[in-house]
């Protein structure tokens, strides 16, 4: 590595004319290489047209090449996702794709995974402060009475987003309004910020009594971080994936009878309760993250989307009922990174590029998560976990 | 899109000979294209040598091209990270890189960000069940007495990992041992699984009384999901980034005086407490995720790494003290995806490819998070948040 | 102490005829004394008529004499509690009554405490299990559509309780219905169990599709234990007490200027966040418990009632705004222990024995809590805390 | 009720000479009666000698008469509690004593309850602030190195309390030291405040570098409120009560086979996880509170003591293993209210007045909690819950 320059470092080059060009991308790579003494041989190797990136990135200088493997086929009996799917996973964690594939084989032989989107809401939660709690309470009632007009103001900002309802949360002289929207195929965070802002402007203009302070967000939403509120009341999609696995099949494929996996579930529930974990399952985040990167999702939403509930039962006939619930799965098939080159191809592989496909995508993600949790859970119980990482992973 | 084939879908092609070749990658792309009727024009455009991917992915078929922009320069006064850095961010969220850059400009003019790694531990938490709680307690004491020998057994499996201590957590007749390791430059999850397993094998062979059940993990760790335990006792690195910002500078650059940002902090603390959020800050996950993708980290660890604490003060002279604490930042500069083509280049840009650079990388991540939280917080307060998404983002 | 009898211990004497008599009370005391070798000189010293205790206790054998001190006068500007109050506190913790009195003196000189009941709901949350999540979702919609008829069934069981709404919470194939009732002056736990049961019987008789399992409660309520859900959505009364304290007054009476108390608040907020505490205040439970014992409340509800939020501000003129919010304050002025001898006298001292006085009582409790938190907070800051326990408490 | 006086209310009478006399008690009752127009016929009926109350209450004016019933006999196979016990319960909730008695009958016929105190610590957690996190970290290391001397300073303040260890928790530039003490038979809150203060005075006098701020407590302890930290690391005693119940016995006595109770446990675990409850059991708080009032405990500690973990298994032979873990049970058999008249009699009934009996008392409380949870759980499952409240309670 060459020595870095001395003296204060210069600004990164930008073009005020058109910043989304191969030229500017190369200019910046050369700049970074020069300033940091690093050879950039791979960063500039991409097929993504720079002009498609306006709105997705600033100071574009190349791409991360994240390896994609396909898992599957996975059989899903969803309301929206029906049939078999090859699931694209972008990851650098060895064994991950193989492990999910194993769960997909098991669930496919068991007849497929049932998936259901049971709730849908994206939100922004502005906060209003008043002189005291009584004023805040009066405001809350006024908001309830004026919901339809607030909704008009909010909905007028977007052809897609629809204000569904406004929850209220109160402490001290403060009142949070949690605006819940449906957002079509978009994840909707920006859409709802804009729409909520418009609703709040109407409120501020029309509320007949004094408001001490207003702010568009103050951590109740909660965005880009987990909250218990989100697990209770959904952020994005709330999706359930579930299956009943024949006892014999589990023993044959996973080397782990239902009783053993169920016992592990009991221990894991206690562990999660004691640790104060936001998920009593195994590793939802792995499948979610790998699909998010591959399919152009906002990967930072792994923060919210990785929370969840696992619930299992031994059926009277000895079969194993297993389910995962993802209460805050933030997904999109339109907007954000979904239209970019490789990302759109991956969505297309899943048949999720058409209008109205976001719930289909949500169901596929949930089914994938179920496969991964079955596979890892069984591996831990059957004591094949460390050894598979030895064989397939970087543990060498 | 061509129609999908009817009938059950076939297995994804694999080569038992050598699966990590351009040939096999193309074979799988062609297979997926054929089976799903999707043209894959971009997925196969990569410069990453397939033979480097063994241990990182199975069924390799191409790459996700995730756009990278550089933010900065950012000035850091760390114990390990000293000087100015251009920070690579892989994201598809418009305004993100620009917003972090704004925070970097502010903090640089204020003299730079102080960063400190205050704790370091990666863990696996096996569980032991006994006939009753009294037996479990006796076991716990025996483990304490035999720590050195257990450590020998664990440490013998790795030249890098060192067992630091074993915490114990107990409920009912169950006892979890939380093995804490330092792992050099690796994130260490696999390393500690193997080492903990070896420690537990020694325990099982030598504990003189009956153990009813043993399992290598039962959700107390907690891996790939947030837990309060991890926020209390660190998983990965515990890093603090902090700065004192002159009042005038904040007003000039952020259009937001300290008092206004501090008031917003009060509201945000209440919002986070009421929501039951795992982070009272703004959007740690955004910066962390963008750097994780760019730099070859295990991105699923955003689940744990996105938790955190924000603490601020108005100083007697009116300046603004601001800090972020990331209690479970899971990072590596060796192993996992860190050696891959673009990922390694990004680490190199940060000067984080040498042995012993993991804490440097952790500090740069924390400093970046601080810049992003300052920038977004100020934008919310100055009411520039929605409008900047209008200008730079996809909100059109 | 006399030796205990050998052999298995006999049953406690009961009268199938009339168990609530002085005779049976004495018979049991003599029995216990004989069996355990303990002299019971004080337990039988009571003025409470045994015949009033049917419905409050079984195997009655005497009373706990819990010392009562009065704090105050406390000045309250509530919606329901208006004027000055002497507050009965039953406790054995030295300094407690004195400390609350100090807070009452401060707040009285500052013009009194504003109190508002901002929400009111008691609940039972039955759970219904189905064959899968899709069935559970369909059931949820059916419940929404049939709310009015369910309400009729529930409300028919009580002249006081009114079903307000039914929240729904879902995971896996399970669906919880959180029935929210208003309950007049009663705490209402039993009333709502009965009413919810009736509602669920109607549901079970009329829901046209199969229900796999029903149970009247499965920990979502949550009863006799704190839950985050209760803090978000209220169990019992949600009450706010607040005041703005002149800077000079705080310094004079509490030896603690607003800035110092506010700084401590910042530390305490961080401490509470990090500890994962259900209350960021000081010691809500002390005042609540002392009033609960004195006034015939169900003291076990301290489990829920001790949660809360504290929020403070330094006003532009340097005064101190301080508030406490109790989100799950479970109180009654009718039913339970409220009609018992000393308990009713204490409620009467507060003017809370008339019909419709439960919110008045709730406000007095909240105001008391505020006084105690101000007093302890100031003592900690002014370093008078340990020394006052030295002077007044048992620390000798 | 007579009208209240107009004009500001006067101070409550106190005697600067001797405030703990029958005279002063009556003077205050007469004062309260006069000022509030309330007849106080029962409050003054007590046998407790006022002179014993100094250190337990201020402004003493009488007693709350809380009815006590005895439950049992309960059979305990503890390390400290061995044999059968009649358990005094002070409550006004009808059915409670009867329900606990039912559980005691079941467990006694099953051979008794195994109890174990598995941890013991009372704490105070002072906070130290520094100029930055690096200084805070250096301080933390210095504290570790100087533990023995700090311990000397702390332990010198008390003949009973022993500093066991100091945990450290860090965020930003703040560092909390969690001083853990054993406290003999005392609950120890005041003892450890004093001892921690002494330790911190030594620290402040001897730490060679600047400390920006020190405060003896800032909500990490956490006192008089639940925290996850306390559930993880024990506040007071951590006690387990457990039993294996023959299948036939459960069906005979509880009308509830193990499978049914276990299924309910699965639902309850999910309910608790989703609600964010601090206890996945049924109603620990009821038994704890009733015993706390009867036995002179600090009843406000129900806030902490009501948290807990329930764990159950179906054994291979169909029997039911059931356990409760109380991680923060704050109990005393010396100090506080334990020496008062009726309270001491109740402790004596349990054989818990001798030196060294605090763990015995803790075990009896835990065993009682187990009985109550078995009884209520079975009643809910067998659908006898509402009907028993109809029969025995106030639901009429």
Image (tube, coloured by chain):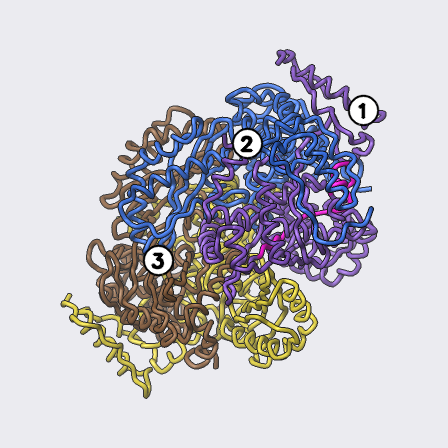
Chain colours: A blue, B purple, C brown, D yellow
What residue is at 59 percent from the left and 44 percent from the top? B285
Q: Position of residue C224 (x, y in %)?
A: 42, 53
Q: What are the residue bounds of the magenta stretch?
A: B323-346
Discs 1 and 3 share one subunit? no
Disc 2 sits on a residue from what chain? A
The residue pinned by badge 1 equals B22
The residue pinned by badge 3 equals C298
The residue pinned by badge 2 equals A331
Discs 2 and 1 share one subunit? no
Q: Is residue B327 magenta?
A: yes
Residue furthest front as drawn: A17
C125 relative to D166 in the view: left or right: left
Q: Which one is nearer the viewer's eye here, C28 or B128?
A: B128
In this picture, is D109 found above or below A322?
Answer: below
Mark 3 or 2, which is nearer the eye? 2
Quadrant of the rendered structure where residue D384 is? top left
């Amino acid at each position: 590595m060459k020595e870095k320059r001395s003296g204060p470092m210069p600004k990164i080059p930008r073009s005020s004319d058109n910043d989304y060009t191969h030229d500017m991308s190369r200019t910046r790579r050369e700049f970074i290489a020069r300033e940091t003494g690093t050879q950039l041989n791979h960063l500039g190797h991409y097929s993504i047209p720079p002009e498609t990136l306006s709105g997705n990135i600033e100071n574009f200088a190349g791409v991360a090449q994240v390896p994609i493997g396909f898992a599957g086929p996975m059989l899903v009996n969803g309301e929206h996702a029906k049939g078999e799917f090859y699931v694209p996973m972008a990851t650098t964690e060895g064994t991950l794709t193989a492990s999910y594939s194993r769960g997909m084989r098991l669930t496919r032989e068991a007849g497929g995974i049932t998936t259901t989107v049971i709730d849908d809401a994206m939100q922004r939660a502005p906060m209003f402060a008043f002189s005291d709690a009584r004023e805040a309470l009066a405001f809350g009632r006024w908001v309830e009475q004026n919901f339809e007009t607030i909704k008009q103001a909010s909905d007028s900002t977007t052809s897609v987003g629809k204000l569904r309802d406004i929850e209220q949360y109160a402490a001290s002289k403060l009142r949070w309004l949690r605006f819940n929207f449906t957002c079509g195929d978009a994840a909707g965070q920006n859409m709802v910020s804009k729409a909520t802002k418009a609703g709040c402007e109407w409120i501020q203009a029309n509320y007949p009594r004094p408001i001490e302070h207003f702010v568009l967000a103050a951590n109740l939403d909660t965005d880009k971080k987990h909250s218990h509120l989100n697990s209770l009341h959904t952020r994005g999609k709330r999706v359930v994936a579930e299956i009943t696995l024949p006892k014999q099949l589990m023993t044959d494929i996973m080397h782990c009878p239902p009783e053993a996996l169920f016992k592990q579930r009991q221990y894991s529930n206690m562990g999660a309760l004691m640790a104060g974990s936001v998920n009593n399952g195994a590793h939802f985040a792995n499948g979610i993250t790998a699909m998010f990167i591959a399919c152009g999702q906002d990967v930072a939403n792994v923060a919210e989307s990785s929370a969840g509930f696992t619930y299992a039962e031994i059926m009277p006939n000895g079969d194993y009922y297993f389910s995962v619930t993802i209460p805050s799965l933030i997904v999109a098939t339109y907007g954000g990174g979904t239209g970019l080159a490789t990302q759109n191809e991956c969505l297309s592989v899943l048949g999720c590029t058409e209008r109205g496909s976001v719930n289909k995508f949500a169901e596929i993600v949930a089914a994938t998560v179920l496969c991964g949790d079955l596979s890892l859970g069984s591996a831990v119980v059957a004591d094949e976990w460390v050894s598979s990482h030895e064989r397939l992973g970087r543990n060498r």
